[in-house]
Image: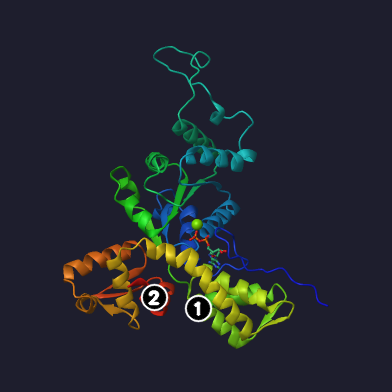
Amino acid sequence: MRARRRNPFTPTFGHEPFAFAGREELIDDVIEGLANQPGDPNRATIFIGPRGSGKTVLLSIIAEEASEMGWVNAHATAHDGMLKLLMENLLENAEHLLPAKSTSDITSIQIGPLGLSREMYHETPSWQFRFGAVVKELNQKGIGVLFTIDEVDPACEELIEFISFYQMLVIQKRDVAMLLAGLPSKVSSLLIEDHVSFIRRAFQRRLRSIPDADIRDAILTTIEENGKEIEEDALDSAVEASQGFPYAMQLVGFGAWKYAGESACITSEHVEKGISRAAQEMEHSVILPTLRECSPREVEYLITMASQDGPCVTSDIARKMGISMTNASNIRRRLIDRGIIIDLKMGLVDYDMPIIKTYLRDHPAEWL
Ligand SMILES: Nc1ncnc2c1ncn2[C@@H]1O[C@H](COP(=O)(O)OP(=O)(O)O)[C@@H](O)[C@H]1O
Ligand SMILES: [Mg+2]
């Protein structure tokens, strides 16, 4: 009997996949920005996308590439205590580059005019001072520092303070970069915060659907390089069911592999079973949490859009819903902020999360 092979698909949030699909442009732009001078605008980028679109993994892939280029990464998630974790991570990642007793270890500083010496002034320096010292020390050795902050949250004061501090580093022309990642609604609330006007000028990059061809390559590579095969039709169905959404791709692949059991070839039957299992998981961890954040009117707008193929004319939606254009455009704006739909200009909108469109088509009654 053949040994059961380990499932190579990774439907776990934050888990780096076996084969990373698409996103080349997003990665290349940042990497180019790091290779360029400190003034490159790609050095302050915000990645925006719904749960499961691949933000966390994208940050780690970029951080890995950056460290291959000699950069040091400091990573944290935006919540209370993030500054401490960010500093610890920076020191850990830079450990081999900093002398045992470096400026960053300073626990006392000299106050010139008062004549206090280093020894006499024993107050712990601010976190800004400590970060500034480590960055300066690394920069003097020709090493850049890449800050990556995940799960952006406008309610996180330490994040807001860090963004202001980062701006200071930019003004000082330090060799630094900062990548933020977050859900569309969190990022849009962050961008309206008064004290972080600096971040409004950062590049905002949406994690849109990945082209089918890239999803196809990634599924096929994951399967073949792990010792199984997949029938052509089965692969077509797996790609179609993934709808360009990374988490769905991992779920479908995981299910298909599982149902193939010890068989060396994944068939359509295995994929179909995988798809129905994936649908339940997608519903629970991506679709429902996203829809539950929407008001009843917003859901109604989405259902009206879902009943039609392709992009929708905004005035038609307003008419079908029996509401004024002003009302409809307020709802549309909120849905765009949530990252569920996109404005195609010329009075047209379309789904940015086709996975939600399909779901609402199948379950309209539950939501109306
Ligand atoms: N580009 C990609 N190609 C293939 N799988 C991906 C890709 N990006 C993310 N994934 C997978 O998708 C899932 C969600 O990724 P994650 O980065 O946690 O999303 P987010 O942070 O946006 O919620 C994980 O299972 C991960 O392995
Ligand atoms: Mg994440």
Earlier-in-chain disc, 1 versus 2: 1
Q: What element carries label 1?
A: helix
Give above or below for 263 relative to 75: below
Compute the Cα span from label 1 to label 2: 22 Å
Q: Residue 130 carries which label?
A: none
The residue where tag 1 is placed is 212
Question: Which residue is nearer to you in this view: 312 or 75?
Answer: 312
Q: Indicate the quadrant containing the N terminus: top left, top right, bottom left or bottom right.
A: bottom right
In the picture, measured across the screen, residue 313 lies left or right of residue 172, that is left
List the single residue furthest toward the right. Answer: 1
Q: Residue at x 54, y 43 (%)?
A: 142
The residue where tag 2 is placed is 360
Residue 98 lies, in percent from the top left, at: 61, 36
Q: Which residue is drawn at 44% across and 73% down?
A: 355
Residue 127 lies, in percent from the top left, at: 47, 32
10 Å crowding of disc 2: few (<14), some (14-19), many (20+): many
Q: Indicate the quadrant containing the C terminus: top left, top right, bottom left or bottom right.
A: bottom left
In the picture, measured across the screen, residue 111 lies left or right of residue 299, that is right
Three-letter amino acid code at disc 2?
A: Leu
Question: Which residue is nearer to you in this view: 159 or 250?
Answer: 250
Whether pointer 1 and pointer 2 mark residues with C-beta atoms closer than 8 Å, the reply is no
Q: What element carries label 2?
A: helix
10 Å crowding of disc 1: few (<14), some (14-19), many (20+): some
Query: Is the image coloured rainbow, by chain, by secondary structure, or in one colour?
Result: rainbow
Give the total of numbered labels: 2
Q: Which of marks 1 and 2 is in front?
A: 2
**Residue 16 is drawn in which quadrant?**
bottom right
Residue 73 lies, in percent from the top left, at: 54, 47
Q: Which residue is drawn at 63% across and 66% down?
A: 18
Three-letter amino acid code at disc 1?
A: Asp
